[in-house]
Image (tube, grey):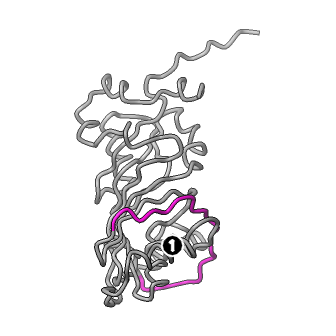
Amino acid sequence: MRNRRRRAPDPYDGLLLVDKPTDWTSHDVVAKVRNHFKLSKCGHGGTLDPLATGLLVLLIGKGTKLSDRVMNGDKVYEGVIHLGVTTNSQDADGEILEEKDAAHITREKVEEVIAKNFMGPIEQIPPMVSAIKKDGVPLYKMARKGLEIEREPRKIEVFEFEVTAFENPLVHFRVKSTKGTYVRTLAHDIGNELGVGGSLDALRRTQSGPLSIDKAYTMEEILACDKETISEKILHLADLIKE
């Protein structure tokens, strides 16, 4: 029986950590990188909303084998909640549905509500403006038609939730939670618990599992590379499997 020759490692098999700019979808980033470097296989390890910036993990070539490992890791985000503003998407990209005065809300009250209702294992009802599918149709497509359907709550866990600054009506925060957490839903629900409503003004992912934004490259840095130099920025599959 003939021995099968083992293929040499491909210099593009692995992970590329991108610091996603705002207004780009995760799909935009994948498509741009794949087409620019003519990669046969390129995906991502966890979506970021267009509003959000920060760590987007691209899975290249056989790096797609690490999809579950990347997506299942806990996530760390930094962001800003805008109290008193409720939108249909639960973030600043949506249509404003209601505005209330939040001048009476204090930092202490915000921290009290977070500690009491938004730490540890909790349940979230996903937003209508999301990629979750119902009968094969993404919810955001239904939302565009003005439809709202009942959504099953999802179990998540919040490990850390720190208010890093408070400039009423803006609440700056850092949160660490399990995969599948909608941070804009946290903002929305915290606002509702405070009685004034709320939405997400800004969001930045700084960590996904053991991977950190410190090792990520901007799109400008990535697109300035050619196919040889981009290989130097990839976390190679052979090294990752050893970890």
Q: Is residue 13 left or right of residue 26?
A: right
Please tell me whether residue 3 belongs to the stretch shown in magenta.
Answer: no
| Farthest right residue in view | 1
Q: Residue at x 26, y 30 (%)?
A: 225
In the image, 234: left or right of 71?
left
Q: Secondary structure at mark 1?
A: helix
Q: Residue at x 58, y 69 (%)?
A: 136
Considering only vertical position in the picture, is 14 above or below 71? above
Q: Nearer the viewer, residue 162 or 142?
A: 162
The residue nearer to you, when weighing 106 against 44, is 106
- Image x and y of residue 237, in percent: 52, 28
Give the left or right position of residue 165, taking residue 189 as reference. left
What amino acid is at disc 1?
Ile
Picture quarter with the N terminus = top right
- Quarter of the image that includes the C terminus: top right
Q: Residue at x 48, y 77 (%)?
A: 128
Instruction: From the top left corner, tell me how far across and down residue 72 is, in percent.
Output: 59, 49
- The magenta region covers 145-165
Toward the viewer: 193 or 111?
Answer: 111
Q: Which residue is mark 1?
A: 114
